Every structure is written in C-alpha cells, then in structure tokens.
Image (cartoon, grey):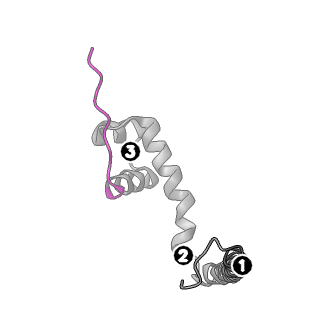
Amino acid sequence: MAKRPRRNHTPAFKAKVALAAVKGEKTLAELAQQFDVHPNQVTQWKAQLLEGAAGVFGSGGGEASTASVDLKSLHAKIGELTLENDFLEGALTKAGLLSAKR
C-alpha cells in the first residue's frame, strides 16, 4: 500500500473547512470526507480558528505599547554597543593595531 504524499493546504482552504465545522451542519466525518482530510485535522483547524477569533476583534492599541517598550530597549542596546565600539577603537589605535586614517 503506497503512502499518500504530504499535502500543504492554503490558509483559505483551512478557514473554509474550519468555518464549516463551526457551523455544525455536518458531522466531522462528513466534513472530512467532503474536503478529503482527516477528521483530526478538521478538529485542529476548528480549534485554531476559535483561538484566533478574538484577535480579529482586538484593538491595535495593545501592540503599539509593547512596540514602544521594545524600541526603548533597542535604543539602549545601540547606545551601549556604540560606546563599546568607540572604546575598543581607541584602545586599538593606541596599541598601534588600528590605523588612525579610518
């Protein structure tokens, strides 16, 4: 018995199957047969849809505040690395290992 080659489903197809499962008009077995996928796959896609549904209606304000925190830490790291580079450049120049023309 030959194995079936692995298939990659598009997000649109997954959403279509998951929405059909959420509607509940057909059983999982019927949906699996209709869309030619395993019933466990239908269950997984339905769970993913229900988990991600809250994100559709969420406000974008929460993401912006976390982005500003990340920017502050990134700016601090840039400053730290700039100081370190300047210090090492000066030390190497004094030691004669780095040309002063740079």
For disc 2, the marked residue is 57
For label 3, the SS is: loop
Camera-nearest residue between 66 and 60? 66
For disc 1, the marked residue is 94
Q: Quadrant of residue 102?
A: bottom right
First in residue order: circle 3 vs circle 2: 3
For label 1, the SS is: helix
- Report the magenta stretch's main SS: loop
For disc 3, the marked residue is 26
Residue 10 placement, left or right of 54: left
In this view, which residue lies farthest toward the top? 1
Contact between labelled residues 2 and 3, with CB atoms less than 8 Å apart: no
How many neighbours does mark 3 have within 10 angstroms: few (below 14), some (14-19), or many (20 or more)?
A: few
Task: Return the x and y of residue 93 as percentages of the image width and height.
Answer: 67, 78
Residue at the location (53% across, 58% down)?
50
Residue 87 placement, left or right of 14: right
Residue 8 placement, left or right of 50: left
Residue at the location (67% across, 83% down)?
75
**Which residues are the magenta region?**
1-12
How many neighbours does mark 2 have within 10 angstroms: few (below 14), some (14-19), or many (20 or more)?
A: few
Answer above or below: position of 43 versus 97.
Answer: above
Task: Return the x and y of residue 65 as percentages of the image width and height.
Answer: 67, 83
In magenta stretch: residue 31: no
Q: Quadrant of residue 51?
A: bottom right
Amino acid at dot 3? Lys
Contact between labelled residues 3 and 1, with CB atoms less than 8 Å apart: no
Q: Quadrant of the N terminus?
A: top left
In this view, which residue lies farthest toward the front? 96
